[in-house]
Structure formats: C-alpha cells, structure tokens
Image (cartoon, grey):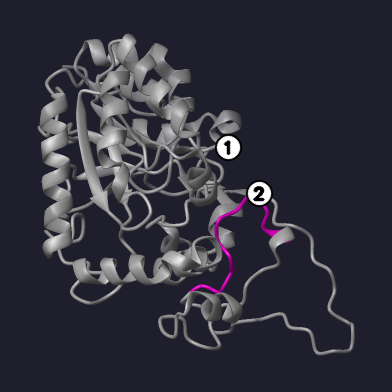
Amino acid sequence: MEQLLEESGVEFDVEPGGAVSVAADRRRGRSAVSNEAGRFEAESRHLFDDGWGTLEELPPFKTTVQVEKPKRIITRNTSPDIAFDRSINPYRGCEHGCAYCFARPTHAYMGLSAGLDFESQLFVKPNAARLLERELAAPGYQARTIAIGTNTDPYQPIEKRYRIMREILEVLDRANHPVAIVTKSALVCRDIDILAGMAERGLAKVALSVTTLDGRLARRMEPRAASPMRRLEAIRQLKEAGIPAAVMVAPIIPGLNDDEIEAILDAAALAGAGEAGYIMLRLPLEVAGIFKEWLLENYPDRYRRVMSTIRSMREGKDNDATFGRRMHGSGPYAWMIGRRFEVAAKRLGLTGRRLKLRTDLFSPPAPDGVQLALF
C-alpha cells in the first residue's frame, strides 16, 4: 500500500497502521484488498512477518454459506428520498464482490469484516418464503410495492443453489402482491415464467444495474457479477417477455465510468429499457477505506482525481448521508452529471417517471396454521 501511495504521489487519505492487505493469491476473484475487523469488535488481528520464517501460508478465501433464521423478512424504512417503504433481503453478504457496495458495513452486525468477509462469508434465509406468507396474511396488512435487491443482490451466484428468490416470487405471485427488483445478474431471466404473469397484471418490474460497458473495468470492480453484455441481454429478454425493464447507471464514479453515461443509456434503450435512473457513488463507514484500497491497487494514477471529485460533491468529505443529497450529491460536478443524464434519457425516451404497480389485486394468503375466516 505504501508503495502504491508513493507511485501515485498520494500523501493523504490512507493513514499509517490501517488495514493490512491480504496476499493477492488468497483473494483472487475478489475485489476487496483487506479484511479488517468489524467496527464493533474489541480486538483487531494483523499478520506480519517477524523475520523468523514462522508465518504460515494461509489458504485462499472460499465462499461459505451459513443459515440465518430471522423472525421477520419484510424490512421497513421511512427514508424520504427512496421510493419504497418495505424491502426483502434473501441473503446477507454478496458474492458479486462490488468494490463500492454500500451494503458492506452491515456485515459488522454479524461480527465480520466489511472487506473480504462480506464477499466470502454469506448468510442464507431458507425460511424467507414462509415468513413472507405469514406476514402478508397478518390482519391489517396493506399491500405496497416490495423492493428486492436494494441491499444485497437477490440473484447472486448462490441463488442458483438455494432458490430463495424464486420461492419469494411464488408467494408474491399467489397473493397478487407487487414487487420491484434490482439486480446485476442475468439469473433474473430464470424467473421470467413467474414475472411475465405478474407483469401482465401490473405487479412486477425489474431494473438492471449497468455500471460500465468496459468488460475489464467490470471484472475488476464487480468480479463475480454478470458481464455488462449479459445484463443488457437480460433487459432484452425481460422486455420481450412483457416485463417492464429499467436500467440503473449506478453508481457513477468520477474518473472511472462517468464518461460512459450516454453510452450505457444508448445500449440499454436499444435493448428495450423503458426507464432509467442513476446514483452517485456513496462511501459510508467502512466502504470508504475499502474503495480507496481497491482504487490504489487498480487505478493508482486516478486516485487523486477520483477522491477529489467525490469530495467536491460531498461537502468536502468522503461521504454525505444527508437525505436529499446522498443519492445524487451536490455542487457543480453533481449538477453537471444530472443534466447530462437528463438530456440523454430524454433523447432516448427513457422516462424518469417510475411505473406504479397495482395494489388493488392483493389477496392475503392463508398459510398453514392460520384458521380461515368463517364469514
């Protein structure tokens, strides 16, 4: 890390004594560079060579999956700058391993690192569908669109094995409950058979996050997510099946992918996207350090420009969590990005208005153990 700082001419931002980089051969196929202890941990352990030749050779990081059994599956929020008030997260952690993922800090609640642990130590919720059915059947429940994929990706690689997302969709389909999905994975096309029927009733829409069209940048930044071309192909397949498809240019990172906004929108519109949105890079809590490490390792020559521009949008800080500013930033650069996006989207007919899904068809399920009403 010190060598990278020296080569890039950076003399700030990374404090001595910070996270220790994990050997490259142990983290091949991952984007995080380190695995610093979670912020709630009382102790932090670091490996170093004391010169006695006793440092053992550790194995590469492998993906492990643990079972999590929550008591509820629908998460509520009251954030004024997002368009949904409830969401579902079938998994905790994400094997896609996006360097910039704002969900990384949630791994600290499990006593794990937001770095390599977030990408390799995953949690699955096998009772998600049963919990969902019970919550939808609760007296007084009022249907509103459930967002899935707003934290970790519901179609990350382990979904092929566990099929939790498909089970959730089956419950929502039977109950005529609206759902909005965000993903980076072409695996969403596996569930077209369910989503097409729901879309026909005005109950489903899907957004694909396309961060870049540069395959090399995508592999470095999102090592286990679908390639950009596969995401565009997923948009095309969804559109052909009659499922409303949108593109999310998210996140926009100054100096890395900000020059691709128009190209991404062009490609998505050609594939059949009907809506478009964008989010500026957010660096909450541990994400700031993880992203900086990744940036120094992969693009040290761009470090100054990227971080300087980020701070120009975030009140001079790495991150600004203020409602109304956190998604799009503030200042001249953020304004310019917004205008570029608006002009390109308007030219392509990509409306910024969100398709409103129906709630009037909702029919509460009657899961096992719940007595049906007599009258």
Q: How many marks?
A: 2
Q: In the rendered image of this protein, does residue 174 appear above or below residue 35?
A: above
Question: From the viewer's perspective, is 82 left or right of 110?
Answer: left
Amino acid under disc 2: Thr
Asked which quadrant contains residue 207, the reply is top left
Q: Residue at x 57, y 50 (%)?
A: 122
Q: Residue at x 57, y 29 (%)?
A: 160
Near mark 2 (Cα within 10 A), the count class, few <14, some 14-19 or many ≥20, is: some
Q: Nearer the viewer, residue 121 or 322?
A: 322
Examine the rendering and report whether any part of residue 238 can be seen.
yes
Which residue is identified by label 2?
63
Q: Which residues are magenta?
A: 26-38
Q: Nearer the viewer, residue 22 or 308?
A: 308
Amino acid under disc 1: Ile
Which residue is identified by label 1?
158
Q: Residue at x 12, y 65 (%)?
A: 331
Q: Are marks 2 and 1 in contact (CB under 8 Å)?
A: yes
Q: In the rendered image of this protein, does residue 302 appear above or below residue 271?
A: below
Q: In the rendered image of this protein, does residue 255 appear above or below residue 192?
A: below
Question: From the viewer's perspective, is 200 left or right of 288?
Answer: left
Which label sits on residue 331? none
Q: Residue furthest right?
A: 53
Q: In the rendered image of this protein, does residue 220 appear above or below residue 52?
A: above
Quadrant location of the N terminus in the rendered image: bottom right
Q: Determine the CA span between mark 2 and mark 1.
A: 10 Å
Q: Nearer the viewer, residue 187 or 265?
A: 265
In terms of sequence position, does the residue under pointer 2 or pointer 1 come before the other? Answer: 2
